[in-house]
Amino acid sequence: MTTANVATDHRLTDDEMAAFIIRGYHILQPELRTGLNDEIYAALDGMDTNPGDAVLEEVPQLNEVWQSPEMVGVLTSLLGPEYEMFPHRHCHRNSPGTPSQLIHQDNLNDLRIEGGQVRQPDRIDLILAMYYPQNVTSDMGPTLILPGTHVLRALPERMASQGNFRDQVIATVDAGSVVILHYDIWHAGTANTSDTVRYMLKFLFQRTTNPSVPTWNHDPANDAAIRNRLESENPMSMQRGLAGKQRHFRTRMWNRLAGDQALDLSYHDKWSGGSWN
Ligand SMILES: O=C(O)CCC(=O)C(=O)O
């Protein structure tokens, strides 16, 4: 998809981009036509079996979500203007009584993934986009996110016995919301203790070109403030060594994405300088 003509006002700001790099997620509420979410919910509810990758052919209205200017603006910011929708996708039907999943990273065993099989802690090459056609309240199995974990490649493949972390984010959202995630983030579907089926459509989008300039709404005048955020924010309490590693990969990620407008990484001492006056 080439998105050169996407209105720039739907692209992320420097602060939103920094927030994504720090937390690994962004929650979007695109303006969708009235009735679209209900139409999609009814179509999904009418299916006898899960069509897997064919869900887009079964429910073509989903294209309206992925092609909304807000969605295109965010994906262009994160993946560049020539991003592509990935052929694999899945409709997650979370019925009443469904237990929580284990917290996990999605696997990389799909050979269609560009550069496959390796986590990329300083890159944004693959995005998970989760669309919810109905409101999701805390008892309906919202998606759980561990913010900031997308850059921690040293963790084991699964945190099988762990759950309920202090700074976890429970994505209770309004109908029509899209939770946009770095592919490597730790996440899980939680238990549905309500009497309503919760649908979530998981689609993947991938970068096809290496970044050379920022593809979000970038203003170099924000550089000092952005650098400060990347170096200091902690979306999730973490052991000191891991927090240091996170900060290192965030700045590398920003610089890789910003290309020739990267942040200056030479040593800087915020407290030195000028004489008293
Ligand atoms: O259903 C959800 O909210 C999350 C599903 C998920 O994380 C997965 O299957 O990888």
Image (spheres, rainbow, N blue to C red):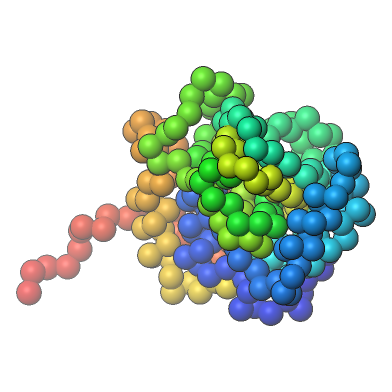
* Outermost left residue: 277
Residue drawn where x is 73% and y is 41% of the image: 93
Q: Is residue 121 above or below residue 86?
A: above
Q: Which residue lies at the image location 60% right of the left edge and 57% below the top edge?
A: 135
Can residue 250 be seen here? The reply is no
- Note whether residue 220 is visible: yes
Give coordinates of residue 218: x percent, y percent. 55, 71
List the single residue furthest toward the front: 195
Instruction: Give the mark count.
Output: 0
Q: From the viewer's perspective, tell me whether residue 237 is left or right of residue 103.
A: left
- Where, by quadrant of the figure, is residue 140 drawn? top right
The spot of residue 129 in percent (x, y) is 69, 52
Q: Which quadrant: the N terminus? A: bottom right
In the image, residue 34 lies at what x, y percent? 72, 74
Give percent across and percent down for residue 126: 70, 47
Q: Residue at left 44%, top 32%?
A: 164
Horizontally, residue 228 falls left or right of residue 46, namely left
- Residue 188 occupies which quadrant of the picture? top right
